[in-house]
Image (tube, coloured by chain):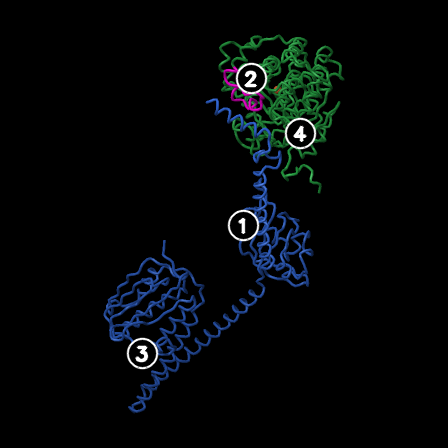
Amino acid sequence: MEPSENADRMAAFRNKIIGLGETSHRKSYYPQLRDQIRELNQAMLALQESENKYRSLVENVNIGIIQTEPWDDGRVIQANPAFCRMLGVNDEDELLDRPAVDMYLYPEARLELLKELEREGRIKDRNVVFKVKDGSTIMCSVSLSAQYDINGNMILVDVVAEDITEKEQRSEALRQANNKLNLLSSITRHDITNQVMILEGYLYLVMERVEDPDILMLLERMKVNVKSIDRHVMFAKDYQEIGIQAPQWVDLMDTLTGAMVSIDRTLIDLHIDVMDYSVFTDPMIKKVFYNLASNVIKHSNATNLTITTEEEGNNLLVVFQDDGIGIADKKRLFKKGSSSSGYGLFLSKEILSITGIGIRETGVPGEGARFEIVFSPGQYKTSV
Amino acid sequence: MAMKGVDDNGSVMHGTLMTRKFLAPEIILGDDSRELIGQYALSLSGKNIFLVSDPGVVKAGWTGEVADNLASAGLDVVTYDKVTPNPRSKEVMQGADVYIDEGCDLIVAVGGGSPMDCGKAIGAVASNHCHVLELEGVDEVQFPAPPIICIPTTAGSSADVSQFAIITDEEKKRKFAIISKAMLADLALIDPVITTSMSLELIADTGMDALCHAFESYVSNASSVITDMFALEATRLVSEYLPKAYDDPDDIVVREKVMLGSMYAGLAFSNASLGLVHAMAHSLGGYLDSAHGECNAQLLEHVVAYNYPQVPDRYRDLEAAMSGNSSSTDSGPDSLVGMIRGLNEHLEIEPGLSNIGVKEEDIDFLSHNALLDPCLATNPRPATLEDIEELYHGAL
Ligand SMILES: [Fe+2]
């Protein structure tokens, strides 16, 4: 090192030792420390803010949220206003520090939930009956999740409870009404069918004994009307079945091929060219597919029916295209009793509408009919 | 407001006062003050105490006593008591590892300069998460160290009141200084009773270290009226009572005076810094691991002779303080040098660096390191490499 260089270095040392410069900080209040404190404060503010946000969420949400200790005689640690309302208490204080089990109509239900929670760590959508302060009860759908300490011991249970009392009552009433309706419908149908069969029998007997061609013609008309009654009854039977089974995911290709088994391939050339999709629908959709195909045979004079899939925007289209005469009058196409095909298209539309699936006819008259079944996002997925 | 200090032309007149700071830790001085350790550790929010000491102090029983005091205040104690004289950077790093691993939150250093310097450096390393070598220099400690309490067992190093920590860089065989306010203890518990266990040799070495602190801070080019006061009083106390303490080590009153002199000297040099004696002594200590006080004692008279022409008045003040007279002779450095020799003789410090193993051929290495020591920055007379070499030769 050059002597002058060392002299500069020494001069800098001396200045710092005299200690009046900016870098000579106080022992315990360094700018770096202040920065750290400021960062910590900011982090704490952010934390506070997010806590406030969640607190207000918990307090304003219309779903009951409580926290309890996870043991048999565990107490309620926290309960939000919605839960207090559900249990008919004025505020949280009436629940705090009380045994959580006191809220349950069936104490053993809580023990079972806790046991399951210990195994699973999380439980979803269990029905539980809680006692309300006025002596009534409410049915809740509850989800539980456990909190653990660093040793993996369960220390808290978070419970989210939705009051489903009214919903349950309504769906029970609906179930009963449905049952009655079905019973009524099937009994009535059965009786009508019997009476129609008897009527038809008598009609044949009468026709064998009548020679007068005028009367025979009238009887012939009566026979047609009797057949029509029979069709109406068959429709009632089909219509009754719609919506009985819960919608589900079905494989498009399997369902289509299943539906086409009873189509007479000598009457039409059938081309199925669909991609791998599953659709969410009433299982009766195969009836829709069958109806569309059988209509082509009955009414269109087509020689080819091509079934394809295409994606249009976010929607999936399942297209039935034939090369027949097409449909000129589209106005009353999907209305009840609109055509000689009876109730086929009306029924199809009803079946599809259960899960919100659309259907439309977009063919050019003279060039063939084109039925498009429209699945919106969420109603279809590509099969894996 | 009075317009004092403004002359007729309106410009500010300057007096003789230099603008200087003065920094000191909280000091508790007096017999048995060491017993307050528990209370103070608690008031500094300590829970898990890192106790730094050395084997000699452990043997004398002081470390154990302090540990017991801490324990009976309900504090956990982790002891780190293998610190050697002239503590090495490795000892600091190991200590910092233990400090962090054990989750300590306060440092108590019991001992002479070595455990105190080591403890201070451990604190700085622990809070800055760096190597101790990165802290070398002035104001290089970024983050404050954890609270530290020093209980000195020698009357000399004054690490308990200074913002210095001197550590040996064992790889390069040199000492380096960490000078920072972060190196200032939060509390110095200065208890003369503890110094009664010192050997005669340790009394002599540490006492001469204290005298060098007083001398060097007084002639320092960073001195102030405050440090001057402490330096002169330290010179007076040490010169008068160190020989008496050496003759009658059990006289507690005499020992108190030496302790007080050492503390004054510490307060002076902590703020005014040191000079060539320490620059050269650090180099010696780093190279030969020799006793710091003895190196100083050997070098002092030579440095006085070298510096004298630069600041003769300052040295005359020191001479007067040493002799106990109100004024000094006008004889140049000879009389003062003579007094230093006389003191060394009384303390049975044999003159000559060769006595502690310095060889002719070491002087080149020693001088290069001394030239870089920050203590040189405040020496009143600038020194070149050649000057330093010559001084080592003269002291050989
Ligand atoms: Fe020293």
Disc 1 versus disc 4: distance between alpha carbons? 61 Å
The tint of chain A in the picture is: blue
> Dot 4: few (<14), some (14–19), or many (≥20) neighbours within 10 Å?
many
> Dot 1: few (<14), some (14–19), or many (≥20) neighbours within 10 Å?
some
Q: Is the CB of the residue bearing disc 1 within 8 angstroms of ligand 1? A: no
Q: Is residue B279 magenta?
A: no
Q: How many marks?
A: 4
> Could you say which quadrant of the image residue A305 lies in?
bottom left
Q: Is residue A221 above or below residue B381?
A: below
The tint of chain B in the picture is: green
> Dot 2: few (<14), some (14–19), or many (≥20) neighbours within 10 Å?
many
Residue matched to label 4: B24
Disc 2 versus disc 4: distance between alpha carbons? 26 Å
Instruction: State the extent of the magenta-drawn residues as a range.
Output: B370-388
Disc 3 versus disc 2: distance between alpha carbons? 114 Å
Parent chain of label 1: A
Parent chain of label 4: B
| Residue type, numbered disc 3 | Asp
Disc 1 versus disc 3: distance between alpha carbons? 58 Å
Residue A383 x %, y %: 36, 55
Residue matched to label 1: A122
For ligand 1, which image quadrant applies?
A: top right
Residue in the picture at 43% in, 79% down: A192
| Residue type, numbered disc 1 | Arg
Give the foreground label among 1 and 3: 3
| Residue type, numbered disc 2 | Met
Q: Same subunit under labels 2 and 1?
A: no
| Front-lying residue, B26 or B214 | B214
Residue matched to label 3: A329
Give the foreground label among 1 and 4: 4
